Image (cartoon, rainbow, N blue to C red):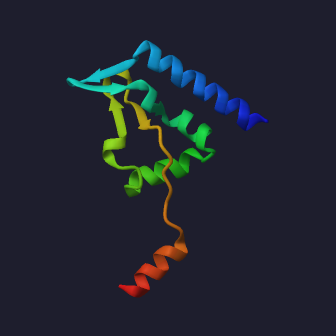
Amino acid sequence: MFEEVSQLLDDVESKLMELTGSKLIIMDKEYKLREWMTLSDYCKKYQIKPSRLSNWIERGIVPNGNLIVIPELNGLKLIKNQPYAARSYETRAVRSAVN
């Protein structure tokens, strides 16, 4: 039930963002805010620990273009709202053995 309510709230928020046309402009580049979220909100939405997300950012699982740092807001980081996932250890082991 919690997931259903959470999904409904996400849908309402997304529709409000579309209606208001909320956007962020940094160095003449425009970002639609409905596509971005804080790292904390991302962790809550996708149910991962902040340390895992930091690890993914450092390892390049989250591409550089999918992360915005806003110096004017004390270095606030926004991440593109889409799921990311590291490859499983088995997949890496199989690929390493093949190569």
Q: Residue at x 60, y 28 (%)?
A: 10
- Camera-side residue: 64 or 83? 83
Q: Residue furthest left?
A: 28
Q: Position of residue 54 (x, y in %)?
A: 47, 48
Is 58 left or right of 28, judged from the image as shown?
right
**Eyeballing the image, is 23 above or below 65?**
above
Q: Residue furthest right?
A: 1
Q: Residue at x 32, y 46 (%)?
A: 64
Is 49 left or right of 60, judged from the image as shown?
right
Quadrant in the picture for the N terminus: top right
**Eyeballing the image, is 44 above or below 90?**
above
- Camera-side residue: 52 or 97? 97
Q: Residue furthest top?
A: 20
**Eyeballing the image, is 87 above or below 47?**
below
- The image shows a total of numbered marks equal to 0
Q: Position of residue 97 (x, y in %)?
A: 43, 86
Q: Residue at x 56, y 22 (%)?
A: 13
Query: Residue 26 is drawn in which quadrant?
Result: top left
Q: Position of residue 82 (x, y in %)?
A: 48, 43
**Eyeballing the image, is 45 above or below 70?**
below
Quadrant in the picture for the C terminus: bottom left
Q: Residue at x 42, y 38 (%)?
A: 80
Query: Residue 95 is drawn in which quadrant?
Result: bottom left
